[in-house]
Image: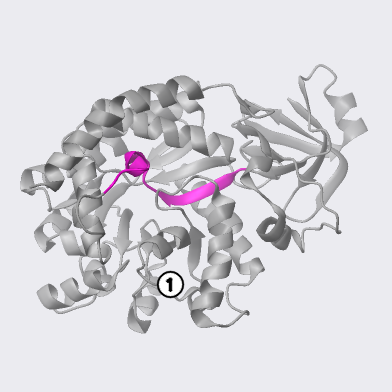
Amino acid sequence: MLILNGQIVTPDAILTDHALYVENGVISAIGRTGELRARYPQAETLDARGQLVMAGNICAHTHFYGAYARGMAIPGDPPKNFPEILTRLWWNLDKALDKDAVRASALVCLVDAIKHGTTTLFDHHASPNFIEGSLDVIADAVDQAGLRAVLCYEVTDRDGLDKAEAGIAENKRFLNAQRDRVRGTFGLHASLSLSDATLRQCRDAHPKGGFHIHVAEHEADEEDSVAKYGKRVAQRLADLDLLNEWTITAHCVHIDAAERALLREKNVWVTHQPRSNMNNAVGAMAWDTLFSEDFKLCIGNDGFSNAMWEDWKAAYLLHKVTSRDPRQANGGAIWQAAVNNNARMASQFFGGAPIGQLIEGARADMILVDYHPFTPLSVGNLPWHVLFGFESSMVTTTIVDGRVLMRDRQLTTLDERAIAEEALALAPGVWERYAAYARR
């Protein structure tokens, strides 16, 4: 496929009068339009009509299983803190999910991702009454959508040791059965819901390491670790040999300086979810400190909509208002995390061609953006155009591995209406089961 008449956003320049040629899912050439037309005269063409051609967005941490929380009322008084949100909302909703609800939750989130130009997602799943095979159900949905994803099951002790062991087995099984556009890692909930014994079982089941875990999202995680184990969360995880260059630590809002040094030493990935942190009132991570210390800092959405530019904007604003310092969370730093670091993480997990950048040899994951600036646009100021000018509705076309998943805002791989109707039909049962657990 030859993409013509676009403004191609490469790491070094925004190219006009250039074309991009895709073959076997890879960007095999970027060059002058006339030259590529002559080189590939028989190629199928896609006319970008002057739009920006950009790498697809990447979500570094999400939860497909939370889809059925949208519009759902929590019985009783509103939760007053994050631990209550966990126990009264999420830990009842995840138990309410059966196989059909897991599949529907994934599909509605994947529709959302395609429409908003998010082409790779790192999902963290929980459904304690449907564990075995749950990751295959999600992987089937990802395959159907045509997107790219890294999946795991959230191991926790909160539902009993049998289900913790079932979660371990599901991660281990899935790690050995990966697919072209789907990879696995090993999911852990958080220190506060995992015993040393269970964490040792996880380490033994995955000796090469690399875990996807929530770290110090709220003070309760640190308080629990200190009270039970006499050490803070990062130190506990390090002592159990769970931290390395493949580990994804989500949130890290309440880590201290010693934990930052330890996490930096272990070379982990750290993901920031600003909309979720604001919604749950857990605080704001030390963004500029982590950035200045050269952390592998990425951006996810924690189950919010897959319009990733919204999380870029939230991060840009959150740290300014909490610090009362407009210099915090510079737009260039947001770009470094959301584009460059997210791309590095995705490329590492897929272990082959680069993902998340438009260069020759990279996987052909890209979007067309109908943005027409009225001030000069360059690679140097593009982050600020995104933060102050881009809207998710401007994504018109989404391509993964060279396959068009949405063309001119029309989905080609998923039937959005049918998926929404199926999910809606299942919702009363999910909500009823949720309410039954919430009353216990």
**Residue 421: quadrant of the picture:** top left
Q: In the figure, is residue 164 to the left or right of 323? A: left
Residue 181 in view: no
Position in image of residue 79 (x %, y %)? 25, 61
Three-letter code for the amino acid on which mark 1 is drawn:
Ala
Residue projecting furthest to the right: 34
Residue at 53% over, 22% down: 413
Residue underneath mark 1? 284
Residue 426, x across and y down, in percent: 29, 26
Q: Where is residue 333 in the image (x, y as percent from the top left)?
A: 61, 68
At horizontal 43% and vertical 32% (from top left) the residue drawn is 108
Q: Any magenta on residue 63?
A: yes
Query: Which residues are drawn in magenta?
Result: 56-73
Which residue appears farthest toward the front when viewing the image?
77
Q: Is residue 41 left or right of residue 78?
A: right
User: Measured along the vertical axis of the image, is residue 191 above or below residue 123?
Assistant: below
Q: Nearer the viewer, residue 86 or 26?
A: 86
Between 309 and 297, the one nearer to me in the picture: 309
